[in-house]
Image (spheres, rainbow, N blue to C red):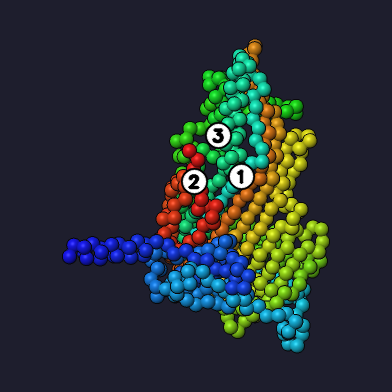
Amino acid sequence: MLKNLFTCLTILLGIQIALSQNITAKIIDSETGESLSYANIQIDGEDSVVSNSEGYFSIPPKNNDEKTILTVSFLGYYTENLTVGELKNINFLIKMRPGTFELETVYISNTEIDADSIMASVRKNLKANYTDSGKPTKNTVFFRESTVIRPKQVKLEMTQATGYSKQQIKDANKELDEFASQMINYPPKQFTDRLYNYYTSTKIHKEKPVPVQKLEVVKAVKFKDANRSVTLDDMEKLGAQVLFKHLDATKHYRIKSGLIGVRDTIVSHNSFVSDSEYEAEMKKSNQKAARSYNWTFLYRTNILINGRFDFINSSELSELYEYSYAGVAESDDKNNRIFIIKFRPNKRRAKYTGTLYVSEKDYAIVRADYTLVEGKKLSGINLKLILGIKQLENFDKGTLVYKKRESGEYYLQYASQENGQYIYVNRPLKFIEITEGDKDKVGFEFKAEMDEFEKEEYFVMSESAITEGDFEAAQEPEFDYMQLGSYDPSVWKEYTTIEPLKEMKQFKSVE
């Protein structure tokens, strides 16, 4: 009797554990086996999620019932409908069938399709397709940002120090070498997740409509190793902690760097605020910073006004870029087709290559994939020989996915932005005591060469119309980030979010 009871309890416990875990699945091309990035998965016709760049997506425990229906769609492929139970039977691997027609046989009104004509229609209809109505709206958004710094070389060497013996300088340099080695062996990384409600409306200011916004953060998490800096400010703070071990805590110093003048920078131990002061300052600005960041991101991904998207919005489209028709893709709307348009630079000042997916009905771009051409750069400065400084923004890649509202216009449902830059610094640093008479001097040689990469993902989980009263009632409370030293899959188990990449899953602090 007791044995049977124990068996039943064990089975029930196993079921409970299974139901409380996220289900993770992968989407691939049935013919090539390649992962399908940013496919759309609708859960029971309501919640939506997208696959990540590795093709994976996850389903939260609340949707783990075997009868839950999944609708998986991806441009150029036939839509798949299956239940969670069927997903388990195929080992959580969804193989989607290509549904792109051959281009030689496709005509419209007996006229062969011309890519330049399609792009001219795209530009002509941009405002109609993407101008927001200004009506009060609530979007529930999941945003993920990752920053990785990959140092190629870091060298920090003490060259002189008043009152130091050769052995003391040698010991100091050993500590500085350990700091540099730590940077290279354990590249700095940080991952930030935010789930928030984003409210928009329109106000009349000086007889003109002005867009207004509110942002309510529901949950925010940072996966960060406190011992590994991920921003230049963090690097300055950690580096200063090492440097100030070799400076007199009671004195003030002026910094001199190189041969060109003396910086009017006075530093001491008190120049770098304590952790408690720093955390208090950051806490005050969390909400404001998140709202500002959201607004900036939406500007940077706005194909109507941002010059980065000259392959879509330039008045010189056919001069800047070469467009080619590559076929017709399946659409969720059976009465509509999607043109696939490839593009590449036609002139030197054009910088991107990629693929655009254009709706036949209204010439709206429903998806855009673009990459900065290898060898091109967005910005940069090269004063390597003169000042020992070089910076190049040399990597840019993105995907934009749009969804059509019932009112006819489109909104950004998903965006992935990847940006990278090369940084080189080779500068001498000298700390000179501020005093009359003899001055203490401590000199360092600093050399660093690194690549910095940033990836941002923006996903609208749901959108709904609200009243003006709802907008006015929306609050923007302050919030704290949950700070974690390693990845924890349970953090977002109640929500339908973006499945993290392998690099994020493997993240953990270095002891």
Quadrant location of residue 444?
Answer: top right
From mark 2 to mark 1, how far is it between C-alphas? 15 Å
Q: Which residue is mark 3?
A: 238
> Relative to residue 4, is residue 293 drawn left or right?
right
Mark 3, other Cα within 10 Å: few <14 / some 14–19 / many ≥20: some
Query: Which callout, 2 or 1, points to the residue nearer the camera?
Result: 2
Please determine whether, in this image, residue 305 is positioned above or below residue 275. Answer: below
Q: Which residue is mark 1?
A: 149
Res. 114 in view: yes
Q: Position of residue 313 (x, y in %)?
A: 71, 66
> Relative to residue 124, is residue 184 drawn left or right?
left
Judged from the image, the secondary structure of the residue bearing numbered disc 1 is strand
In terms of sequence position, does the residue under pointer 3 or pointer 1 come before the other? 1
Give the residue furthest to the left. Answer: 1
Judged from the image, the secondary structure of the residue bearing numbered disc 2 is loop
From mark 3 to mark 1, how far is it between C-alphas? 15 Å
Question: Residue at left 47%, top 35%?
Answer: 275
Give the residue furthest to the bottom. Answer: 110
* Front one among 262 and 156: 156
In terms of sequence position, does the residue under pointer 2 or pointer 1 come before the other? 1
Query: Which callout, 3 or 1, points to the residue nearer the camera?
Result: 1
- Amino acid type at image mark 1: Ile
Judged from the image, the secondary structure of the residue bearing numbered disc 3 is helix
Give the residue furthest to the top. Answer: 437
* Front one among 478 and 28: 28
Question: Residue at left 48%, top 68%?
Answer: 92
